[in-house]
Image (cartoon, rainbow, N blue to C red):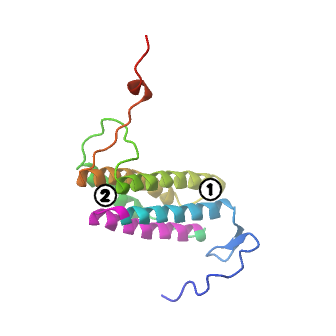
Amino acid sequence: MGKRVSKVITRTGDDGTTGIADGSRLAKNDRRIHCLGEVDELNSQIGLAASYSQLEQIRDMLKHVQHDLFDLGAELSQPTRALMQTEHVDQLTTQAEQLNQTLPPLQEFILPAGSTAVAQLHVARSVCRRVERSLVTLNQQQAINPHSLIYLNRLSDLLFILARYQAAQTQQPEVYWQSAYSRIKPTQ
């Protein structure tokens, strides 16, 4: 593979536009560019989550996801190209189902809290949901690969399961939600 970026400061974006891989230029606030930025943010959050996890299994899964997210970004940069496939979704589904089988059933909603590693996985999950919402909006304006939408939906599920798995494997108690009703004593 040759050099992809030889010059970082190009000045070509000084006018408020940015180039995408198909050679076109779009406004920096274009919905597609917005989605690219959110995928990049998600990838960064996942990298941070991987750095906090002590579990090699989680770090390996997240590294693979980061490569997938670069594929998704490449796909968004080349609107006529579909890189995300059923296999991407199937892999996440299998991983999520296998890990979830090792966890106790949920008894209550879980707060996005606990150790730094657990909390960061929840941050990545919530960012993933936002990215998914943005891609749904883009898809309403211009058709995108449906596998990309399914992938993000499955990824947020996997990140939730990974947060629970991280807590279980490191003996961190999950923090359960206590509704206002259960925290406040009724007045008579």
Asked which secondary structure carries label 2, the reply is helix
Query: What's the distance in space between the residues labelled 1 and 2, CA to CA?
Result: 28 Å
Front-most of residues 14 and 149: 14
Q: Name the residue under label 2.
A: 95
State the count of labels.
2
Do the numbered discs 1 and 2 sit on residues whose CB atoms are within 8 Å?
no
**3 to the left or right of 175:** right
Label 1, secondary structure: give it: helix
Whether residue 80 is visible to the viewer of this picture, yes or no, is no
Figure check: 68 above or below 180 = below
User: Magenta region: which residues?
Assistant: 52-76
In the rendered image, residue 168 lying in the magenta stretch gets the answer no
* Left or right: 93 in relation to 37: left
Q: Position of residue 93 (x, y in %)?
A: 35, 55
Q: Which residue is drawn at 68% across and 82% down?
A: 10
What predominant SS class does the magenta segment belong to?
A: helix
Give me the disc on residue 175.
none
Is 64 contained in the magenta span? yes
